[in-house]
């Protein structure tokens, strides 16, 4: 219908119609945006744009509850609590007793993970080492003694002699990186859309992800995965699921889909962390790729039903998994154009408070 109207209506009429729609939208949105209740009414009866997110958050909560009883390669609950204990261990001054409210359930979850024998060995060792340190440092209250008894009964073995426990900043002093070196790396990084017809070695992607996962993550949950496609055919198909790739998708040799996992959280208040944590990791991934001679371009993922449906089917995603962005990767074509993309000035970006 829209194509038919485009063919019969002159451009001047379309401009008038767009202006009328703009005025109407402004009035409607101003009214419904005046308070939280009316905003909820609007998104209940006049727009379903948030319906997929609502469903994904609920599905994530369901999966989180399931994960408390069936633990696979990682436990969001265990990771969060072990990190909470780590923070307690580094407090100045450190309290003589801390973590009593959740220490028993933490040890029980670790016991369950060991019994089910599917949890990642490195994650298990981190939990064992931190808990061992915890019981050394805490006064032995009735609750802590009960938890310690459960801990000492665990049937587990550690993979190496390195302790995965908190440390002091002093050990970082020999790893100094100059501002100039870091700025040079950032200036070298560009959003590259044109690549050489050359296969990207998978082992280089893995090396870059080793750097990416060192990014900060709330309670060290790392609520994301990197879906890597080395096949040019599938890379192009995945790239075309997103917006903004028209005209250059066909030359992408490799693509990484960054996927958030809402099953890492038990409540709605943390639903945005999949976007925050995965974006922090992806920026480090981009810079790591640059040091390996690979260029990349972060591809925006618009929250659209058709786009979500395509990529969910292509990657076989669960309902609680949300696409965050795509990242095209390849060896840069030296004659390929790059947008200048002048950044905002510091006067605009920096607000003193």
Image (tube, helix red, strand yellow):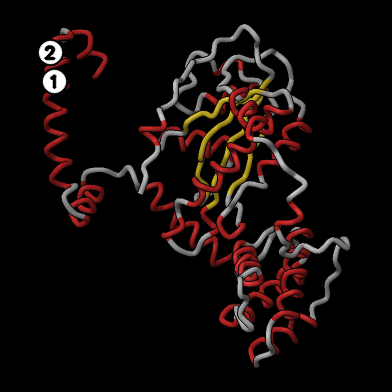
Residue 59 versus residue 237 in the image, above or below: below
Q: Which residue is mark 1?
A: 17
Measured as percent of width and height from the top left, residue 166 is found at 71, 64
**Residue 283 located left or right of residue 20:** right
Q: Secondary structure at mark 2?
A: helix
Say which residue appears at 59% left-offset and 47% top-offset: 224
Q: How many marks?
A: 2
Q: Secondary structure at mark 1?
A: helix
Measured as percent of width and height from the top left, residue 61 is found at 48, 61
Say which residue appears at 74% left-offset and 65% top-offset: 165
- Asked if disc 2 and disc 1 are in contact, CB closer than 8 Å, the reply is yes
Q: Which residue is mark 2?
A: 13
Residue 151: mark: none
Q: Nearer the viewer, residue 45 or 283?
A: 283
Cα distance in 3D space between marks 2 and 1: 6 Å
In the picture, residue 219 is in which quadrant?
A: bottom right
Question: On the rendered image, what quadrant is the N terminus found in?
Answer: top left
User: Could you classify mark 2 by the number of other residues whose Cα lies within 10 Å: few (under 14), some (14-19), or many (20 or more)?
Assistant: few
User: Could you classify mark 1 by the number of other residues whose Cα lies within 10 Å: few (under 14), some (14-19), or many (20 or more)?
Assistant: few
**Residue 139 located left or right of residue 4:** right
Q: Nearer the viewer, residue 86 or 187?
A: 187
Residue 288 versus residue 213 in the image, above or below: above
Residue 55 versus residue 83 in the image, above or below: above
In the picture, residue 11 is in which quadrant?
A: top left
**Residue 233 located left or right of residue 304:** right
Residue 51 versus residue 227 in the image, above or below: below
Measured as percent of width and height from the top left, residue 212 is found at 66, 41
Measured as percent of width and height from the top left, residue 204 is found at 76, 31
Say which residue appears at 72% left-offset and 42% top-offset: 176
Say which residue appears at 56% left-offset and 25% top-offset: 297
């Amino acid at each position: 219908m829209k194509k038919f109207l485009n063919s019969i209506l002159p451009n001047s009429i379309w401009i008038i119609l767009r202006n009328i729609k703009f005025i109407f939208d402004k009035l409607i949105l101003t009214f419904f945006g005046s308070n939280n209740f009316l905003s909820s009414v609007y998104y209940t009866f006049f727009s379903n744009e948030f319906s997929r997110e609502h469903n994904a958050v609920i599905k994530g909560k369901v999966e989180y509850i399931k994960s408390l009883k069936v633990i696979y390669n990682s436990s969001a609950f265990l990771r969060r609590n072990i990190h909470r204990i780590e923070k307690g261990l580094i407090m100045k001054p450190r309290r003589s007793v801390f973590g009593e409210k959740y220490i028993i359930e933490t040890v029980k979850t670790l016991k369950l993970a060991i019994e089910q024998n599917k949890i990642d060995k490195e994650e298990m060792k981190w939990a064992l080492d931190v808990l061992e340190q915890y019981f050394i440092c805490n006064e032995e209250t009735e609750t802590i003694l009960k938890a310690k008894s459960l801990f000492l009964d665990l049937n587990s073995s550690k993979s190496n002699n390195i302790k995965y426990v908190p440390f002091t900043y002093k050990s970082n002093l020999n790893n100094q990186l100059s501002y100039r070196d870091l700025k040079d790396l950032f200036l070298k990084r560009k959003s590259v859309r044109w690549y050489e017809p050359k296969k990207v070695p998978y082992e280089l992607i893995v090396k870059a992800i080793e750097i990416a996962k060192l990014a900060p993550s709330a309670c060290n949950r790392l609520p994301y995965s990197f879906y890597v496609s080395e096949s040019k055919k599938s890379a192009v198909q995945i790239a075309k699921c997103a917006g903004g790739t028209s005209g250059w998708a066909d030359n992408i040799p490799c693509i990484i889909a960054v996927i958030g996992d809402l099953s890492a959280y038990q409540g709605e208040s943390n639903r945005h962390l999949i976007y925050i944590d995965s974006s922090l990791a992806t920026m480090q991934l981009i810079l790591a790729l640059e040091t390996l001679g690979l260029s990349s371009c972060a591809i925006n993922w618009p929250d659209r039903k058709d786009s979500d449906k395509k990529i969910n089917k292509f990657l076989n995603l669960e309902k609680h998994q949300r696409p965050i962005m795509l990242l095209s990767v390849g060896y840069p074509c030296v004659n390929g154009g790059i947008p200048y993309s002048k950044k905002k000035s510091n006067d605009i970006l920096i607000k003193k408070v």
